[in-house]
Image: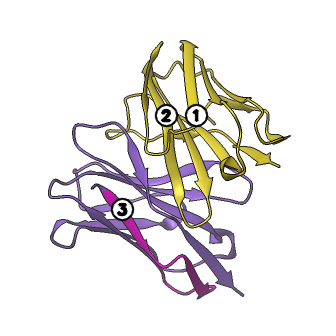
C-alpha cells in the first residue's frame, strides 16, 4: 500500500540549531512530494514541493528538502531554527497516475530559546 | 490566500444526528477534498471531487457522504454522527489534482459529537 512515514512525532531544537524532519515514502515509482506547515488553529500551507526539476528543493522561510530516490526519502531541513518555526509539519505524497494526496502523521517542532 | 471558506467553524452535536459541513471556494478549482485530522494520524482523506457531481471515496469514507452540485461548493454529511467522528475537518482545493500542484486548505471545522 502507498504510504508516507514521518519519523518522530515530536522534535525539539534550540533556537539557531539545525532543523531536520524526516520523511520516507513507499513506492517504486518516484511520486510527487510536498511539505506543508500548520500553525496552531490554522489550515495547512505549502512549504515546498518536489517537481523533478532538481533534487534539492528550496521553500519558504529558509526551509529546503532533498529528494533521494535510493533512500525513498524527502527530509526537510533548515540551517538555523527560529522561534517562529514552531509548528506542525506534514510530509505529503501524490503518486503517479493519481490525484489523491496522502499525508504523513505529522511532526511537531518545538524551538527552545 | 486562496478563497476557501468552511462553515461552521465549530459545532457540537449529539450522537445519532445528521451533520453537514460546507466548503465554499472562489478559485474555480476543479478538485475538492475533505480530510479529517486526528492526533497521530495526520490528515486522512474522506472523500474527494474531480468535478461537479463527480465524487469518489477516500480512505476513511464510512459514515460520510458528499455532494457537489456546483463548482464552488462541496458538502460533507455525517449521516448519523458518532463519537468517533469527533475531529477537525479540513476542506482543500487543487487546480489539477495534486500532481505538481499543491492543495490549498481551509481553516478547518472542529466537530464534537457528544
User: Please, which chain is the residue tagged with disc 1 on?
Assistant: B
**B11 relative to A70, above or below:** above
Q: Quadrant of the N terminus of chain A?
A: bottom left
Q: Position of residue B94 (x, y in %)?
A: 46, 32
Q: Position of residue A47 (x, y in %)?
A: 49, 55
Q: Position of residue A21 (x, y in %)?
A: 45, 75
User: Please, which chain is the residue tagged with disc 3 on?
Assistant: A
Give the secondary structure at mark 1: strand
Instruction: Identify the residue shown where x is 22% and y is 51%.
Output: A52
Q: Which residue is label 1 attached to?
A: B64
Write down the quadrant of residue A35 in the picture.
bottom left
In contact (CB < 8 Å): disc 3 and disc 2:
no
State yes or no: residue A10 in magenta: yes
Camera-side residue: B99 or A3? A3
User: Please, which chain is the residue tagged with disc 2 on?
Assistant: B
Q: Which residue is label 3 attached to?
A: A4
| Gap in angstroms between the C-alphas marked 3 and 2 | 19 Å
In contact (CB < 8 Å): disc 2 and disc 1:
yes
| Gap in angstroms between the C-alphas marked 2 and 1 | 8 Å
Q: Residues within 10 Å of mark 2 (few under 14, many from 20)?
A: many
Left or right side of A67 for B90 = right
Q: Quadrant of the C terminus of chain A?
A: bottom right
Which residue range is magenta in the image?
A3-20
In the figure, the yellow chain has which letter?
Answer: B
**A23 relative to A15, above or below:** above
Amino acid at each position: 500500500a502507498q504510504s508516507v512515514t514521518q519519523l518522530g512525532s515530536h522534535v525539539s531544537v534550540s533556537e539557531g540549531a539545525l532543523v531536520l524532519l524526516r520523511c520516507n515514502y513507499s513506492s517504486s515509482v518516484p511520486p510527487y512530494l510536498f511539505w506543508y506547515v500548520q500553525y496552531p488553529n490554522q489550515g495547512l500551507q505549502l512549504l515546498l514541493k518536489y517537481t523533478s526539476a532538481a533534487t534539492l528543493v528550496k521553500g519558504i522561510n529558509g526551509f529546503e528538502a532533498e529528494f533521494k530516490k535510493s533512500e525513498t526519502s524527502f527530509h526537510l531541513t533548515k540551517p538555523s531554527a527560529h522561534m517562529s518555526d514552531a509548528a506542525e509539519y506534514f510530509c505529503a505524497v501524490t503518486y503517479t497516475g493519481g490525484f489523491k494526496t496522502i499525508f504523513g502523521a505529522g511532526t511537531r517542532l518545538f524551538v527552545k530559546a | 490566500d486562496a478563497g476557501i471558506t468552511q462553515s461552521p467553524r465549530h459545532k457540537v452535536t449529539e450522537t445519532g444526528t445528521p451533520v453537514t459541513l460546507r466548503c465554499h471556494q472562489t478559485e474555480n478549482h476543479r478538485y475538492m477534498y475533505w480530510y479529517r485530522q486526528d492526533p497521530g494520524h495526520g490528515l486522512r482523506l474522506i472523500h474527494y471531487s474531480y468535478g461537479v457531481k463527480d465524487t469518489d471515496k477516500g480512505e476513511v469514507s464510512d459514515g460520510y457522504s458528499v455532494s457537489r452540485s456546483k463548482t464552488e461548493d462541496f458538502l460533507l454529511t455525517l449521516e448519523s454522527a458518532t463519537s468517533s467522528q469527533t475531529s477537525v475537518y479540513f476542506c482543500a482545493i487543487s487546480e489539477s489534482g495534486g500532481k505538481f500542484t499543491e492543495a490549498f486548505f481551509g481553516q478547518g471545522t472542529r466537530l464534537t459529537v457528544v
